[in-house]
Amino acid sequence: METTETKKCHKVNRVLVDSHVEAYMPYQECQGGTQEQKAKFLVEAVKAFSCFLKDHRSQALIKLSVACDYQDQCSACGDRWDTFIDDDEKKKCGNCGIIVEDE
Ligand SMILES: [Zn+2]
């Protein structure tokens, strides 16, 4: 059985960890206004878009797109890639503590 002292890990690049739909709302291009004002506008815009689904055309400026989130991960534990150098000058995963393979 491998222990954390003998087992090694490596960085796994660009692992797909999530995908979601984003809605483009015209307000996002406007300058100024507080985050609270923007949030309030977006809540109302989502309500209006929901009505559009029943009604159509009046909200035609809204565009939908699919966005994917990626992150570099540890091959051993699957957490976000984050390393540190221990007291013995060995590079280890900051999450699981397994030694990183030579790069
Ligand atoms: Zn790890």
Image (tube, rainbow, N blue to C red):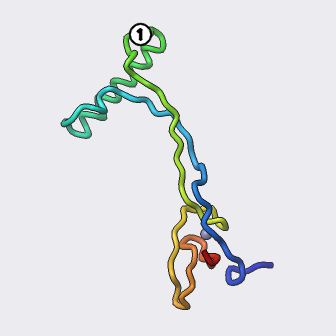
Q: Nearer the viewer, residue 46 or 72?
A: 72
| Residue farthest toward the right in the current orientation of the protein | 1
Near mark 1 (Cα within 10 A), the count class, few <14, some 14-19 or many ≥20, is few
Q: Is residue 63 left or right of residue 8?
A: left
Q: Quadrant of ligand 1?
A: bottom right
The residue that appears at 53% across and 88% down in the rendered structure is 89
| Residue wearing tag 1 | 57
The residue that appears at 81% across and 78% down in the rendered structure is 1
In the picture, residue 45 is in which quadrant? top left
Q: Position of residue 100 (x, y in %)?
A: 61, 76
Assign a secondary structure to mark 1.
Answer: loop
Q: Is residue 26 left or right of residue 99?
A: left
Q: Amino acid at mark 1?
A: Arg
In the picture, residue 92 is in which quadrant? bottom right
The residue that appears at 39% across and 25% down in the rendered structure is 46
| Residue farthest toward the front in the current orientation of the protein | 103
The residue that appears at 62% across and 62% down in the rendered structure is 12
In the picture, residue 103 is in which quadrant? bottom right
Q: Position of residue 18 (x, y in %)?
A: 57, 45
